[in-house]
Every structure is written in C-alpha cells, then in structure tokens.
Image (spheres, grey):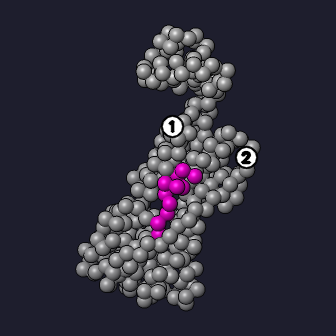
C-alpha cells in the first residue's frame, strides 16, 4: 500500500503521513494516532529505497563471514542480526572464506551506498587489503581482531584462554599434549598456539606436537588427529582450536582403538552446542558468541552515527567448561 492510500485511509494529508513516518514532533496527537492505526490496519511497510533517499541511510549492514559452516561463526551472525533488528537494521551476509576477491565484490555495496557499514570476520592477514577497500567507511572487525590501527574490534583473550585449557590438561596428569590448529593466517590461530606453547614451557614440558587442519571441519579434525596418532610417540591429550575439529579428533581416536579420555583426553574451543552432543561430552573454552555479535553491531552503529568516534577494542569474558572428554 502506498503512502497516498495511507493518507486517504487516515483522513489526513500525505505530508502528515510523511511526518509521522519520520517521527516529526510537529504532528498533532490525534492525527498521529489516525496514521498509526491506518498503518497497523493495512500492514504498511515503508519503502526502503524511499527511506534511503530521505535519510541518506540504507538501514543495511554487510557481514563478511570467514566460514558460515563453523557453528561459532553462525552464532556470532545470529547475535549481529538480533542487535541489528532491534535498531531497525537488516544484514547482508557474504561467506567470504577470507578470499579477498570475494570480499572485494561484496564491498562494492559500500561504494554504492547500499549498506551503511561492514562487520568482518576475515583473516588477520587480509586486513591491509580490506583497509584499502573499505577506506573511511564504518567498519568493525569481529572475533578475528587487530592489535593496532583504526579498526574497532571485539573478541576474547585467546592466549589466556588457551593457557588455562592447557593448564587444566596438565593438572589432570597429561604430559604429552598436542595441538590441532588451523590456518596461521588467522590471528586467533596464532594466539592460541602461542598460549599452548607458553603454558607448556612455563610448566617445564618439552614435548610438543602441532597438526594443522586444512579447514575447520569434522573431517579435517579427523585427518589432523590421524597424523598425530601415526607419529612415533602419540599424545596423551589433544587441544583442538575449535569444537568441530575436536569432534573429528575424537572420532579418529576411537576408530584407532583408543578410549577418550582414558588413553587420550580431548578439549575443544568455542563452547558450541556440538560440544554437548558428542560422546563423551567435550571439555571446551566457551566464548560468548552471540554477545560478541551484538557488541560488534553496537560498535558499528556507533561508527555509523558518529564517524569520528573513538576506535574501541572490546575483550569479552570466556570460561572453561570441564566435561567428560578431559
């Protein structure tokens, strides 16, 4: 239904309807009530393009996700979307895979004013190119954050979280603790490996083994664990940098005839629902994934409303959940 028909239904002028839609305080209360009642009765939805022309905003934001199949990323997107909707925004989602060419294609929406800002979860190593593409547009880097520069970021302290997880495995009597990591072009992968190595060194444990998964999938976790099991000395505990990788690792351990945790303890990272579903249930570092998403959107909206606002780096809380796998 058009704005003209709303005006006719309410018995007011088109200008009055327009002022109501734009929250003008010059409208008489009785006329505002008539217009709102007409809108409710007709299920009227304001035309987004018309709103963009009036306000110079699209009420859309672009979200570049490194891997939407990763449960952690999916939960962050849910948090972004929830906070966006509460503020009258919608999201456009791009599964970039940290591929700069795919990101470049999607970021053309910024130049065309089709979106008001962007939230990225791309690899740390792409930030230089992303900075050139995004320029001065509102931008927040989510989960995969920068240490310096003008990009607002939100995440957790990956080094401390990894150290506590390794400390827990050591306290349970494990001495050969291996790491299943991902691509070191991601900052979180670098930081979690640093935490793993620092804690082992501090506790005087020289045995280390790192197996790199090709992606954050169940099958990649299996393959990475199989490589560890085929070594001359297998580990007695494994720390995987995602719950999905940990689930694959557990499957490989059990297929090889070992028991979890009696022979090899397993711990993951993220605190996804998967950690509770597998058997035995997975010990993991729980991240506040939805809150990370909500905070990322709030930071972005702050930049949209005030482009000169201060750059912020928000570190969220995390906690260790101990279950039967370790």
Magenta: main secondary structure: helix
Q: Which residues are magenta?
A: 285-295
**Which residue is found at the position 73% from the left and 50% from the top?**
310
Q: Give yes or no for residue 95 being in the magenta stretch.
A: no
Q: Give yes or no for residue 288 being in the magenta stretch.
A: yes
Q: Position of residue 197 (x, y in %)?
A: 55, 79
Give the secondary structure at mark 1. strand
The answer to whether residue 122 of the structure is visible from this angle is no
Q: Position of residue 105 (x, y in %)?
A: 53, 38
Could you tell me which quadrant the C terminus lies in? bottom left
Q: Which of the marked residues, 1 or 2, is nearer the chain's N terminus? A: 1
Of 96 and 116, nearer the camera is 116
**Which residue is found at the position 28% from the left and 81% from the top?**
258
Quickly name the residue at label 1: 90
Q: In the picture shown, does residue 274 fall above or below 89?
A: below
Could you tell me which quadrant the N terminus lies in? top left
Give the secondary structure at mark 2. loop
Q: In the picture shown, does residue 159 fall above or below 262?
A: above
The label on residue 309 is 2
């Amino acid at each position: 239904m058009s704005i003209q028909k709303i005006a006719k239904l309410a018995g007011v002028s088109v200008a009055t309807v327009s002022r109501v839609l734009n929250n003008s305080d010059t409208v008489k209360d009785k006329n505002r009530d008539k217009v709102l009642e007409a809108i409710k009765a007709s299920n009227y939805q304001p035309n987004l393009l018309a709103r963009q022309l009036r306000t110079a905003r699209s009420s859309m934001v672009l979200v570049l996700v490194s891997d939407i199949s990763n449960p952690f990323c999916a939960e962050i997107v849910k948090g972004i979307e929830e906070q966006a909707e509460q503020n009258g925004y919608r999201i456009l989602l791009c599964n970039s895979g940290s591929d700069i060419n795919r990101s470049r294609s999607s970021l053309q929406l910024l130049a065309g004013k089709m979106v008001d800002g962007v939230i990225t979860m791309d690899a740390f190593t792409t930030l230089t190119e992303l900075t050139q593409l995004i320029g001065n547009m509102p931008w927040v880097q989510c989960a995969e954050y920068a240490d310096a520069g003008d990009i607002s970021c939100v995440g957790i302290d990956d080094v401390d979280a990894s150290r506590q997880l390794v400390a827990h495995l050591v306290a349970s009597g494990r001495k050969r603790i291996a790491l299943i990591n991902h691509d070191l072009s991601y900052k979180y992968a670098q930081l979690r490996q640093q935490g793993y190595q620092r804690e082992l060194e501090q506790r005087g444990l020289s045995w280390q083994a790192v197996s790199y998964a090709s992606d954050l999938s169940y099958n990649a976790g299996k393959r990475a664990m199989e490589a560890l099991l085929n070594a001359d000395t297998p580990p007695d505990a494994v720390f995987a940098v995602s719950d999905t990788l940990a689930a694959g690792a557990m499957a490989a351990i059990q297929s090889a005839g070992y028991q979890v945790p009696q022979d090899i303890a397993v711990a993951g990272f993220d605190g996804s629902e998967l950690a509770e579903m597998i058997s035995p249930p997975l010990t993991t570092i729980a991240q506040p994934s939805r809150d990370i998403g909500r905070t990322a959107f709030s930071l972005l909206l702050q930049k949209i409303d005030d482009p000169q606002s201060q750059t912020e780096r928000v570190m969220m809380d995390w906690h260790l959940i101990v279950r039967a796998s370790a």
